[in-house]
Image (cartoon, coloured by chain):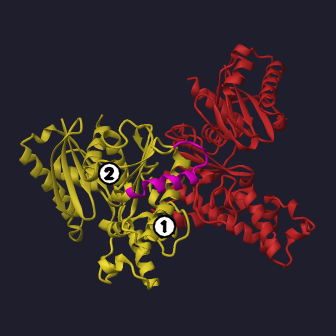
Chain colours: A red, B yellow
Amino acid sequence: MYFIGVDLGGTAIKIGLIAEEGRIICKLERSTPVSEGFEAVVGTINLMISDIIEKTKIDRSDIKAIGAGVPGACSEDGLMYSAINLSWENVEFAKRLKELTNIDVYIENDATVAALGEVEFGAAKGKRNVVMLTLGTGVGGGIVINNQIFSGSNGMGSELGHMIIGENYYDCNCGNNGCLETFASATAIIKYTQKLLEEDEKNSLIRDKVEGNYKKIDAKLVFECAKLGDELALKSVKRFVKYLSIGIGNIFNIFDPDIVLLGGGVSKAVDYIMESLIKETYMHITFDYDIRDRIAVAKLENNAGILGSAMYARTRTV
Amino acid sequence: MYFIGVDLGGTAIKIGLIAEEGRIICKLERSTPVSEGFEAVVGTINLMISDIIEKTKIDRSDIKAIGAGVPGACSEDGLMYSAINLSWENVEFAKRLKELTNIDVYIENDATVAALGEVEFGAAKGKRNVVMLTLGTGVGGGIVINNQIFSGSNGMGSELGHMIIGENYYDCNCGNNGCLETFASATAIIKYTQKLLEEDEKNSLIRDKVEGNYKKIDAKLVFECAKLGDELALKSVKRFVKYLSIGIGNIFNIFDPDIVLLGGGVSKAVDYIMESLIKETYMHITFDYDIRDRIAVAKLENNAGILGSAMYARTRTV
């Protein structure tokens, strides 16, 4: 028996055919035709599934279910309430994909299924209580409690990126001020670095590297320049660590999880700052306990979405 | 079959004999002999249990278990890691009380058992996912997920009062700055009101009522004066609402619970501010959904502790 895992993002759609025990048999990737709208996106997913079936020569009836990790909040029965990056609101995603594929479809938030993937096969293997932060353009949250994913009574929970943790100089896309996302995402690092460059006339490696075009700055460049000792980059990284440690501290005080996982593009830079991140997080936890081995970088990287969503479909069809 | 519920606080010990279905048969209350130390406190609880058995003429062997709600973090097997108000650290509370009473003892954090009590008999009856904030001298947190209490992998979680939500002008007892507790507890209201009075030379009802002795100010007085239109009191209440709504907004974004309950002494004033609290919380939730009937004041008041801890003992002995 097989499962299809769908990782639906604002930029790309990834699809994997996954064996019941979690082996990736085949995977495909295409750009998400966001501007063409809902039908085009669901149609693309359907075509990709047909492609994968043809390519692997498996029988459609051997696919037990499709799991999809989606960039937004959704109900247990497959309604997507809201996905800002796709400009979707209240679309019957699971229902429509089932109509097209004739296979049962189960959907969940992308960070939530990524957390499940990490529990099954990655950095949180065998752990019972896990909280994952995906540090990318925004900050997503995935929660596993007692081996089960948790996204609240209506699928609107686990929005850890919109936990308000302080005051910031710019507002979040959600309309609030001080969300974790505005301090600890790639966007936050870029914005703050641009702000420092605009305020500060001193030399910075970053200014040289982008030849004065601040729009070219990305989070990777900031971390690279910080590693090279650039003062301005170090200031930006320090601020990122300060607020991420507050976010992680809050997670420990609220969930006391076995492990906090950091995923998403920015997490690739975390090894470099892990020591200071742990040190600052210690300052924020209420009780005196060891967290040294309880903060880790996620392992599955690009496969987290397809593996996690396939495993989510498996939990729903047991 | 009966259960004993123990509500162990820094000021008073309350004990109830509770029938299996939750009826309070008899209750007793005594001051907590904090200064006399651990043995004196456990000894007092033992004596109170003997008193209640004698008074009600039930058979000791008909008491299935003792449940205790304790002011701090504890392990599943009854070790109290830390209780600041009792000056206890790492005490084998459950073990010692069992030795004295010869009855099985199960302990949990006081706000956590209060939440369980509210789910069983109070304002959250029949709800599956519930988060409770106890607004008193500090701010405690209780979490019920899928009908089960949740306090993390080691009993160190559910410390919602120590969630950092902003920057404050004074530090929390826990050593951090910006904990919800420093904005939304009775202590926070008192401190901020005192600060305003010290800074502001204008007349205030509060100044008159305490005859200039700011040490006499309590949260109740501040709410009373706000109701009478006193500007300074209104400013203090407004700040309380602002930050409490951020805390509750974070709880919705993280847990999407069926209901958020407000308990503790300060919650008695919440009816007066409920409209503005709901209005401000709406501003902080990420998705657009109805929370009007999902914020409520706890119902069990003084009985929450004994009922909740007895019901906790019941869940542990099923």
Q: Residue B192: name its quadrant.
A: bottom left
Residue B103's x, y, as percent? 19, 45
- Whether residue A292 is visible here, answered yes or no, is no
Nearer the observer: mark 1 or 2; the answer is 1
Location of the N terminus of chain A by quadrant is top right
Identity of the residue drawn at 29% across and 56% down: B92
Q: Chain of mark 2?
A: B
Q: Which numbered circle lies on residue B239?
A: 1
Q: Nearer the viewer, residue A39 or A17?
A: A39
Q: Give the structural element (helix, strand or loop) at label 2.
A: loop
Q: Chain of mark 1?
A: B
Residue B305's x, y, as percent? 28, 51
For residue A192, above or below residue B193: above
Q: Which numbered circle lies on residue B78?
A: 2
Among all residues in the image, which is located at the extreme bottom?
B201
Q: Residues within 10 Å of mark 1 (few under 14, many from 20)?
A: some
What secondary structure is the stretch in magenta mostly built from?
helix
Say which label, 1 or 2, has the lower sequence index.
Answer: 2
